[in-house]
Image (cartoon, rainbow, N blue to C red):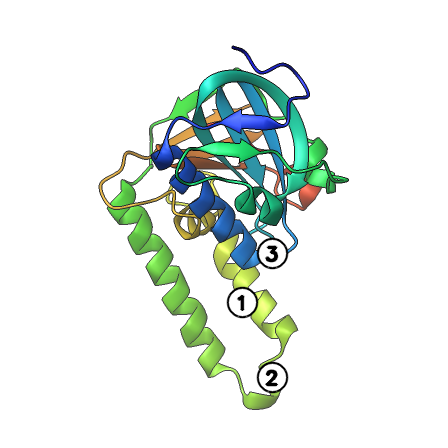
Amino acid sequence: MTVQAGARTLELDGAGEAADLAAFLGRLLHYDRAAAVRLQAQGGALAVFGRPPSFDVLAVRTARLARPAELDATVSAGELLEAIDASTGAVQVPRAVTGPPWAGLLPPRGGWRQVTDGVPDAAALRGVVAAAVAEFRARDEELAPEGRTREARDRIGRDIWSRTLGTTELPLRAVHAAQSLGFVRPGVPVALFSAGGWLRLRTPYGSVSVRRTAGGLGALTVAPA
């Protein structure tokens, strides 16, 4: 039986899908306890979009559904996490909430082309993030006590995380976000795609996307993995 549009129940394809989705929601809530997510279910797939504010990117985690469904709603990430039955994969979709500005942005559904030049493997990506974190800590420690302000630290962070990955145009903050959200893991394949002004870093565990002309919410989007 197909779940009709507006249905408030989804059935994930087993406990594994439920656990992976719960882990993604938990990571989003770590960065924002009031996080909202946009759900888009079509056929046998569910895409869950979120925006961890610390990274200024948008992310998406997909999950397989046991039963086809049609749904488009923005809900509380915390309520969605609580609504997942880890043993059965059933999800009672929470009531819709007024979405944040990013939730109104729709991802490009086609036109993506893979960028093959200058894209490191997962191990190298993790090394890049580790080096950047170490640099941030070192520069932070060099600040005089009276100069260790939020503004000073933000300047250091912007300098480091706005750098691009190798010869690509992908900002390091996108790589940091992908690792922090559990997308970049040892040994997993990593791919970079572009579509118009968009860039998307994808692994089997999820994607993060940004615009080449980075500069706030209006310059970001997400795309399904």
61, above or below 155, in the image: above
Sequence order check, earlier mark of 1 and 2: 2
Residue highlighted by disc 2: 147
Residue type, numbered disc 2: Gly
The residue sitting at the bottom extreme is: 145
Check disc 3 and give the amino acid type.
Asp
Residue 69, image x and y in percent?
55, 17
Q: Quadrant of residue 105?
A: top right
Q: Where residue 74 sits: x, y (%)?
A: 68, 35
Say above or below: 168 vs 112.
Answer: below
**Which mark, by number, is residue 32?**
3
Query: Which is more N-terminal, label 2 or label 3?
Result: 3
Dot 2 crowding, Cα within 10 Å, few <14, some 14–19, many 20+: few
Secondary structure state at the residue bearing disc 3: loop
Residue at the right extreme of this rendering: 98
Rendered image: mark on residue 186: none
Q: How far across and how far down the image is residue 112, in percent?
A: 48, 20
Question: Cα distance, mark 1 to mark 2?
Answer: 12 Å
Packing grade of label 3 (10 A; few <14, some 14-19, many >=20) is some
Q: Which residue is nearer to you in this view: 198 or 209?
A: 209
Q: Which residue is mark 1?
A: 156
Residue plotted at (60% across, 66% down): 154
> Residue 38, how many percent across, how many down?
63, 34
Secondary structure, mark 1, is: helix
